[in-house]
Amino acid sequence: MAMAIKLSLILLFFLSSSFALYEDQVGFMDWHQRYIGKVKHAVFHTQKAGRKRVVVSTEENVIASLDLRRGEIFWRHVLGANDVVDQVDIALGKYVITLSSEGSILRAWNLPDGQMVWESFLSGSKSSKALLTVPANLKVDLDSPIFVYGGGYLHAISSIDGEYLWKKDFATEGNIDVHQLILPGGSDVVHAVGVTDSSQFDTYEVDVKNGGLLKHTTASFPGGIYGEVLPVSGGRFVVLDASRSVLVLITIENGQTHLEQTHVSDLIHGSSGNTVILPSKLSGIFSLRTDSCIVFIKVTNEGKLKVMEKVDKTVVVSDALPLSEGEQAFALVEHGDGKIELSVRLVHDMSSNHLKETVKMDHERGFVHKIFINNYVRTDRSHGFRALIVMEDHSLLLLQQGEIVWTRDDGLASVIDVTTSELPVEKIGVSVAKVEHSLFEWLKGHMLKLKGTLMLATPDEVAAIQQIRLQSSEKSKMTRDHNGFRRLLILLTRAGKLYALHTGDGRVVWSTLLQSLRTTSQQKCAGLKLHQWQVPHHHALDKNPSVLVVGRCGLSLTSPSALSIVDAYTGKELQSTSPAQHSTVQVIPLPYRDSTEQQLHLLIDADKHAHLYPTTPEAADIFQRESENVYWYSVELDAGILRGYGVKKTHPSNTVDDYCFETRNLWSVVFPSESEKIIATVARKQNEVVHTQAKVIADEDVMYKYISKNMLFVATVSPKANGPIGSATPDESVLVVYLVDTVTGRILHRMTHLGSQGPVHAVLSENWVVYHYFNLRAHRYEMSVIEIYDQSRAENKDVLKLIVGKHNLTTPVSSYSRPEVTTKSQSYFFTHSVKAISVSSTAKGITSKHLLIGTIGDQVLALDKRFVDPRRSLNPTQAEKEEGLLPLTDALPIIPQSYVTHALKVEGLRGIETIPAKLESTSLVFAYGIDLFYTRIAPSKTYDSLTEDFNYALLLLTIVALVVAIFVTWVLSERKDLQDKWR
Amino acid sequence: MKHTVTVLLLIILFISSNLAFESDELIAEDEDELIRSPVSSSSSSSSQIGSRSQSPSQVTRKRSTETESDSRVQFALEHAFGDSSDFSVAGTFTARLKTSAHGGQTLTKLRFSRNDLTSTEKEKFKKLLETDDYYKIRLPSDVLNAPGRDYVISSVKARCLPRNGLDEHILINMEGINILAVNYGSPGACQYPRPLKLPAKWSFNSHTALKYSELAPRTPIFSEDIGGVEIGDDEGVKPMVERSFWAKYWMYLVPLGLIVMNAVTQGLNMPEEQAGAQSGGQTQQAVPRGQGAAVRRR
């Protein structure tokens, strides 16, 4: 008994210590990259003293302070997915003010270190535009107020502590939609400019001291209004009418509002529709974009419109930047061939460029999307300008003096899909000099290590050892390695750019902006999925591996898809069809390959036709042969129906297209809409390998896992419980989980969790599924496991039968046989809420498994699968303990050492991908969100290899010493013998 | 009026069961484990009730008493042969609708009567067998107001069905009065590759079952048990402490014992060795002599 306890304690100890990482091992086999996403606002902060930085907010809801010199992140905060940043500004020269969640949350962050100073929740009565105005030098009773419009209210908030000063309800003033908040310099009045019922133009003047309404002017405009009202200069506004063909200039003088209409076609000859007023705030000038060009129009003092200049419509214009002499400058970026032209102009003097620079630009970055400019004083006391530009691939660049100072590949913050590719095989002809050099380096490194081991190394040498370990050229080589650790991670980002990252050090090997996925003015394209297309292993070894990128051009499911095939070594787009003839709803990689090792894919369109790729006669031939055994399923989330399909038998004569096949509905599962709603479906990973079907349990009995590639886990909740936790009572929320066979539509197992609700995260592997949900009755998160076993093979226990061959293990299994399965399940409490669950995968599936859980704290936790074994019992028998079964506990332990991400965070964690290495013990883990993290894990420790820092020199030295010792003793003993004989 | 209709219905049912009725009745609870020999299922009996050769009058009486408290529902099983043909009625399910105390409705006592295959249907089925195509069935997803939102479809390769007759197994997954899914197939294994085999008898042996969801096991909560478990552990530990002097210190005691033993044997051997040493001394003396002789000889 005591031994058993000891045993289990030791076991626990081993479990906990199995991934514990020493401090000097950090960064040795893992890397972590921090990103922020596509920048949408930038505020420069150029305090006289201190480091120069820029504060940005992004589409990933990140607020970050970046170093202007190097582009590094000083600090960064990731707001929640629902907390969209509306505006960013700097107040009092020391606080970053952010307005988020449609103007309902106002926060102040300390500029140097990013600490939150205060936070105010602003209540609103309706959803409206969110506006933030931070007056530069307005003092009201020793306080500098911030004005926020959100939810139909105008709030004045103290910038020192976030206290409410006053609020003014605009919702009671009719159905006004405030477009602008303006604080004319030096006055104590806030002007709120808006539109009521899109036909009436209103301005309100509000006292900054108490929020009292001072003046209200109104003018009706029957033509209707399109877009936003843009202030041009003091008391002047422009807006487009509903038809987008008439410009309305609004002038407010002495409490009177004048409207003046000008046809756009009068200003710009031959312009067509789609006119938009660009939101750039330039004093006295506004810019108008039409289908063909961008026009700068000056509003003269008399209220006349005058066209200043026409530029190409791809030009991007920045906001105006006030310069010291009271004049303003703004920047224009024009895209040329392989370069961009940045020109800075003064608002007063539009005719000439104040500054014109040409910067070479990589084609793969696409067009410029946004530009922010900032000025500095040069050594010769003239104005210098630097520009922060956001490119089409979401990267961020700083331009200064005609050069790119730094770039950030922030497209990697929005990874959609991940796949991997092997690296090329190492060429055999390596020069002798190189070998000698590397041998020398190798020896030197090992001598250093030896010194370190024997504690003879100086601190400098210790640092050198660490350096060698971290930057070993071995791990970042561009060739295939024996252990399969070096690979290319191929990432598809939301910007439609494909990146290849080396697993050794995380550097970008190549990146391609896919032409087929580029959003043009006609269509909006986006990538969807990434698939292995060609993996040469046995044949076609002269070809490079390639990946298939599937995208969609348009917003609806029926819009045409975009396909492209990209070489995984070079990033070259080998083939692209955009837009394709059909839409794509589902991509099914088939387990068949043609003679060039191209994987066959079936693309299902919205009309349920199956399109075969590659479109070669050979592929069609293979498919025709195997089409009988091709099944797939679709999940109709809205309707709550699962459907299974097969390919219709067709006669070759009456098909429209040789590669388009009719499908037929084979089965359906209809979930009752009043009681169940599908919230999660999880299938097994296609490439998962299972080592053995048999599982030997305690009393030398065998259980057979029910291993089917066609198993689908479905979780449904009652419709009321579909909302966030707390929206339904335990009595009305029911979680039902299913295991469905996707060939026949058979429900293999169905189980109801009363009083539980989603969100459900699940992982299905081998014969088990682990899922995570919330138990409303226990007020805790739970994880459950279901293991499914095949009973029909239970008789195969006789070893003699196995030897003689009288077993049914080799007979093919048909899904149409009635399965005799039993399930075992168990639930445990789990402390964290979960963002993603994955499972480690190894080359042969022998190594035990670890669940990889992305926790709410954006970390990845490795949990041994043995903790979620349904056979755990309160008091396991001796035999069960020897098997390694843990005593049952009600909660799953969270061992701090088992965080795969150790001290790091993968902000905004969205997915965890596991890739088997060639070495059976090791699995590669890639976690992505806003950050990227890569590491290797060995769930059962690296039993099949020496660790990388194994000291070969010490081993060699020991062997040499032993050999020497043997020789010495041999010689000595010979001598002794001889002496003895002479005696 | 309603009563007469039901009675009429029952009579029809009874007649049909007399003629070609091959159905199977099961009570809803725990009916997952339905594996019965096809021979027994050709009669309209239920294993749960016990007597296989139930007299029809008994059945009707039983039913008539039940109809007073519960209502009956009926829904049709439709089938299709391959892709080309449309669905047509193949049989009827009858079941009792039971209303539980808290308002939930469930079906019990499912009975199934299958229509005979017509000659055209036989032909179609034969064709399916020849081409190894799918035999499809469907049920309404809502038994009260059929077809509900959509039909629940299931299909099987026709070659899986023929044995002696045509064996089918219909497992209906229910949720209240809604049919979630139907698992249709042969009652046993369907080997692959599927050989073409025509049935000897062109009639269906039907096995039907209803299945409801099972409840998940509750998460064990040990908040109260922890003390108990610890006490148990203590109890387990205490006697061990009593007897564990050896268990605990054997690693010290055994070497100690060995050393002692060694010392004792050495102590015992000492006089022997001295004696042996003396005798050895004699031989040793002899060796140099021999050596010397050899040297001298050289």
Image: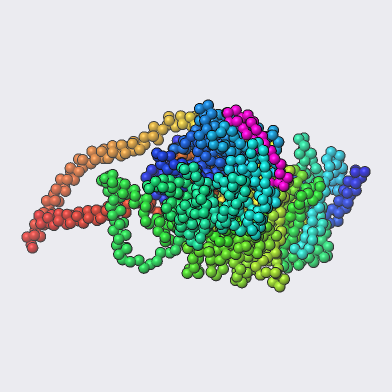
Q: Nearer the viewer, residue A230 or B201?
A: A230
Q: Nearer the viewer, residue B204 or A304?
A: A304
Q: Is residue B285 above or below residue A878?
A: below
Q: Residue at x 15, y 45 (%)?
A: B278
Q: Is residue B251 above or below residue A340?
A: above
Horizontally, residue A398 falls left or right of residue A163, namely left
Q: Residue A258 appears in which quarter of the rendering? A: top right
Which segment is the magenta one? Answer: A203-228
Q: Nearer the viewer, residue B77 or A615?
A: A615
Q: Position of residue A689 (x, y in %)?
A: 53, 56
Q: Quadrant where the C terminus of chain A lies?
A: bottom left
Q: Position of residue A671 (x, y in %)?
A: 71, 48
Q: Residue at x 18, y 45 (%)?
A: B276
Q: Nearer the viewer, residue A457 or A197?
A: A197
Q: Residue at x 88, y 51 (%)?
A: B12
Horizontally, residue B23 falls left or right of residue A449, namely right
In this view, the residue farthest toward the left is B296
In this view, the residue farthest toward the bottom is A653
Q: Is residue B218 above or below residue A977?
A: above
User: In the image, is residue A209 part of the stretch drawn in magenta?
Assistant: yes
Q: Position of residue A837 (x, y in %)?
A: 55, 46
- From this viewpoint, is residue A688 visible? no
Figure colour scheme: rainbow
- From this viewpoint, is residue A378 visible? yes
User: In the image, is residue B79 part of the stretch drawn in magenta?
Assistant: no
